[in-house]
Amino acid sequence: MIETSLLDYLATALPGVRVESRLPQKGTVQFPVVVYQVVSSKPVYNLAGASGLTSSVVHFHCWADTKLEAMNLAESLRMKLSGFHGMMGTTSVGQTVLQNQYEIDPAFNDEGSDTSTFRYLAEYKIYYVETIPTFA
């Protein structure tokens, strides 16, 4: 699974940055944090069946207390992921492509609060090799 390899890679590539599969519960969040979501995974097939190549679209939400922190977090992620190829944990990655990156309107922490958090979304497509199913 690409998720485990991605988490292992980012733990080393972005020391000190928390990477989570979902935003922690309200009131327990410590910013900055990167929240990832595998939006889709699509195996590539040929006439013989599965080729072993899969592409996944992964969203990374870069959350921070300030706009500059969120932007810097997205940039740090870009510097470690965009164009990456090689081993990512135990997964052989052929290419990582930044497809889109944009700011999302600040979200209020609590209703009626005048403090806000800032978020940048970075969308990547990751091409990687996975085991081809065998049928015995």
Image: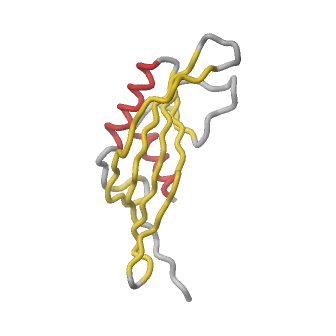
Outermost residue, front direction? 105
At which x and y percent is residue 81?
35, 44
Residue at image position (51%, 78%) is 133
Instruction: Kindly tell me whether residue 26 is visible in this rendering.
Output: yes
Outermost residue, bottom direction? 136
Taking 102 as reference, is 34 left or right? right
Outermost residue, top direction? 114
* Relative depth, front residue between 121 and 127: 121
**Does residue 51 sit above or below 120 in this rendering?**
below
At which x and y percent is residue 111?
70, 18
At which x and y percent is residue 18?
52, 33
Taking 119 as reference, is 108 left or right? right
**Does residue 121 sit above or below 48 in this rendering?**
above
**Does residue 135 sit above or below 20 in this rendering?**
below
At which x and y percent is residue 45?
42, 75
**Does residue 57 sit above or below 82 in this rendering?**
below
Taking 85 as reference, is 55 left or right? right
Where is the C terminus found, in terms of image quarters?
bottom right
Residue at image position (42%, 60%) is 55
